[in-house]
Amino acid sequence: MTPFMARVADAVGAPHDAVPLPTTRPSVPKPVGVGADEQVLIRSLAEQLVSEANAVLADRGRLIALDDELVEGRLGFRLSYGDRCARVVTRFTRGHSLGRLLGDGVGTGEPRELTSPGEVESLLLLLLGEARS
């Protein structure tokens, strides 16, 4: 069992407040290549981590879903567990890209993005915790 798999086992059903929020930063325009590279790194890591998490969750009857969202001018994916979800999206317009994190528990307000691909772990664990009241 990997260290992440152990964290998944601990996070399932844990109080939502006990699960750390992913670290984010305000979204800022970046060169298209930089934004595309970041999106691909985050998506690749998400696929690996979802596989690890689902190995732990298999006996619990509910798995994390990872669905790609490929739309003209935008790359993104959606992570969902039960009735909670999060989306990681990069839009490409006028020679720049803009990353955005959307979803349950990640806040609303100004556009924000993950600070690094490593924050996908926290994002997944956030989806597994008990819903906030």
Image (cartoon, rainbow, N blue to C red):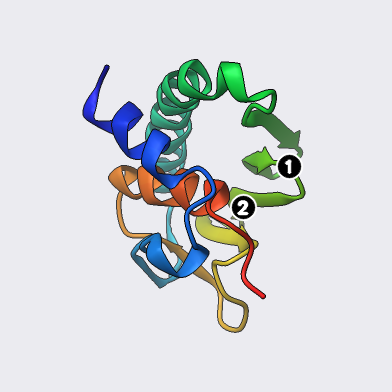
Taking 118 as reference, is 14 above or below it?
A: below
Q: Quadrant of the N terminus?
A: top left
**Amino acid tagged 2:** Arg
Residue 78: % across, % down: 66, 41
Q: In this view, does 90 lie above or below 65?
A: below
The residue shown at (25%, 21%) is: 2
Label 2 crowd (10 A; few <14 / some 14-19 / many >=20):
many
Secondary structure found at label 1: loop
Q: How far apart are marks 2 and 1 (CA)?
A: 27 Å
For this rendering, which residue is in front, 62 or 104? Answer: 62
Which residue ends up furthest to the bottom in the rendered image? 109
Horizontally, residue 133 falls left or right of residue 110, namely right
Question: Is 19 above or below relative to 122?
Answer: below
Local crowd at mark 1 within 10 Å, few (<14), some, or many (≥20)? few
Residue 37 at least partly seen: no
Q: Is residue 31 above or below residue 106?
A: above
- Residue 108: percent from left, percent from top: 62, 78
Give the quarter of the image for residue 26.
Answer: bottom left
Task: Tell me the mark number nearer the camera, choosing from 2 and 1.
Answer: 1
Q: Which of 30 and 43 is in front in this view?
A: 43
Which of the 4 image quadrants contains residue 94? bottom right
Q: What residue type is labelled 1?
A: Gly
Residue beneath the point at 34% across and 50% down:
119
Q: In this view, does 10 lie to the left or right of 102?
A: left
Residue denoted by label 1: 82
Report the residue at 68% width, 28% height from top.
62
Please name the residue shown 37% across and 42% down the image. 10
Residue to which mark 2 is pinned: 91
